[in-house]
Image (spheres, rainbow, N blue to C red):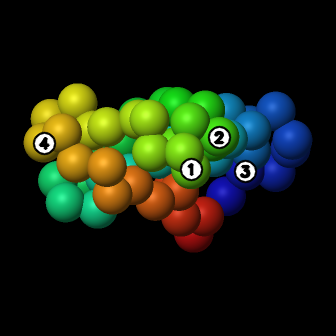
């Protein structure tokens, strides 16, 4: 996929996906782990990091 570090960071760093509605958004990892971040669409707290293909 991405061949250099800047593109890799832009595509995968601090991007999370809602497990319920599959919406992608950018957030800080520590806030997600603490449960302070919710999905904008469905208000769920179940989030996962974006997958590297």
Q: Secondary structure at mark 2?
A: helix
Task: Report, in whole angstroms, how far the alpha carbon at label 4 lies from the one at label 2.
Answer: 21 Å
Q: Is residue 13 left or right of residue 22?
A: right
For marks 3 and 2 on the same chain, the one whose residue lies earlier in the sequence: 3
Tell me what residue is drawn at x 41 percent, y 35 percent. 37
Residue 10 visible to the viewer = yes
Q: Point out residue 11 in the picture as x, y percentages from the top left corner.
A: 61, 41
Density class for disc 3 (Cα within 10 Å; few <14, some 14-19, many ≥20) is few
Q: CA distance from mark 3 to mark 2?
A: 25 Å
**In this rendering, is residue 37 above or below 20?**
above
Question: Label 2 belongs to which residue?
Answer: 30
Q: Residues within 10 Å of mark 4 (few under 14, many from 20)?
A: few
Within-10-Å neighbours for mark 1: few <14, some 14–19, many 20+: few
Q: Residues within 10 Å of mark 2 (few under 14, many from 20)?
A: few
11 left or right, relative to 19: right
Q: Are marks 3 and 1 in contact (CB under 8 Å)?
A: no
| On-image quarter of the C terminus | bottom right
Q: Is residue 1 left or right of residue 34?
A: right
- Discs 1, 2 touching: Cβ within 8 Å: yes
The answer to whether the residues at label 1 and label 4 have Cβ atoms under 8 Å apart is: no
Q: Which mark is residue 2?
A: 3
Name the residue located 31 percent from the left edge and 49 percent from the top edge: 45
Position in image of residue 50 (x %, y %): 51, 56
Image quarter in which the N terminus is found: bottom right
Q: CA distance from mark 1 to mark 2?
A: 5 Å
Task: Give the image location of residue 20, x and y in percent.
Answer: 19, 60
Q: Quadrant of residue 31?
A: top right
According to the picture, the residue beneath numbered tag 4 turns out to be 42
Task: Give the alpha-carbon distance from disc 1 to disc 4, as whole Å.
Answer: 18 Å
In the drawing, what numbered circle is on residue 33? Answer: 1
How many angstroms separate mark 3 from mark 1 (CA)? 26 Å
């Amino acid at each position: 996929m991405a061949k250099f570090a800047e593109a890799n960071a832009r595509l995968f760093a601090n991007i999370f996906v809602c497990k319920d509605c599959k919406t992608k958004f950018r957030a800080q990892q520590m806030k997600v782990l603490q449960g302070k971040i919710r999905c904008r669409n469905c208000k769920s707290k179940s989030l996962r990091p974006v997958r590297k293909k």
